[in-house]
Image: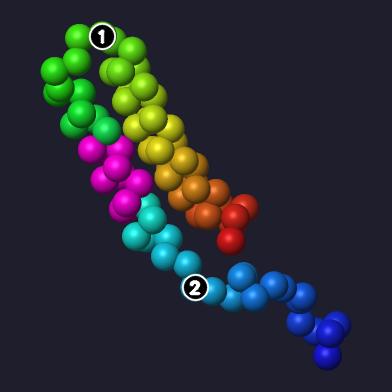
Amino acid sequence: MAGSEPVTSPDQHRPGHRKSGRIGAVLTALALLAMLCGNHEGRVENIWLIGLAVLLLVIVIGDAVLRRNGLRS
């Protein structure tokens, strides 16, 4: 019996919510970009906001590409 089924942990059997995670990441990136219209004077805040938004979007796009190519389950 053990030879026919792969050994997995119970955490791997829980259903994931990929679509809601992607939507949440995109909405968070949009919220970060909306914070650019603020009353701050320095540019350091803008760099951090843009950088974090781009990082979130790169993670979402990279995950989608890896899943489409079958490199990630």
Q: If you read the primary sequence from the N terminus, does the residue marked by circle 1 or circle 2 appear first?
A: 2
Check residue 57 in the rendering and tell me which mark sits there, or answer none: none
Q: Main secondary structure of the magenta part?
A: helix
Check residue 15 in the rendering and tell me which mark sits there, or answer none: 2
Neighbour tally class for label 2: few under 14, some 14-19, many 20 plus, Cα within 10 Å: few
> Which residue is drawn at the image coordinates 28% and 10% (left, top)?
43
> Which residue is drawn at the image coordinates 24% and 30% (left, top)?
33
Query: Percent from the top left, x then y, of residue 61?
Result: 43, 42
* Residue 61 covered by magenta stretch: no
Residue 52 against residue 21 in the figure, above or below: above
Q: CA distance from mark 1 to mark 2?
A: 44 Å
Screen quadrant of the C terminus: bottom right
Identify the amino acid type marked 2. Answer: Pro
- The residue that disc 1 covers is 42
Identify the amino acid type marked 1. Answer: Gly
Q: Quadrant of residue 53?
A: top left
> Which residue is drawn at the image coordinates 32% and 25% (left, top)?
49
**Magenta part of the chain:** 23-31
Foreground disc of the pair 1, 2? 1
Q: Quadrant of residue 50?
A: top left
Seen as rendered, the residue at the extreme top is 42
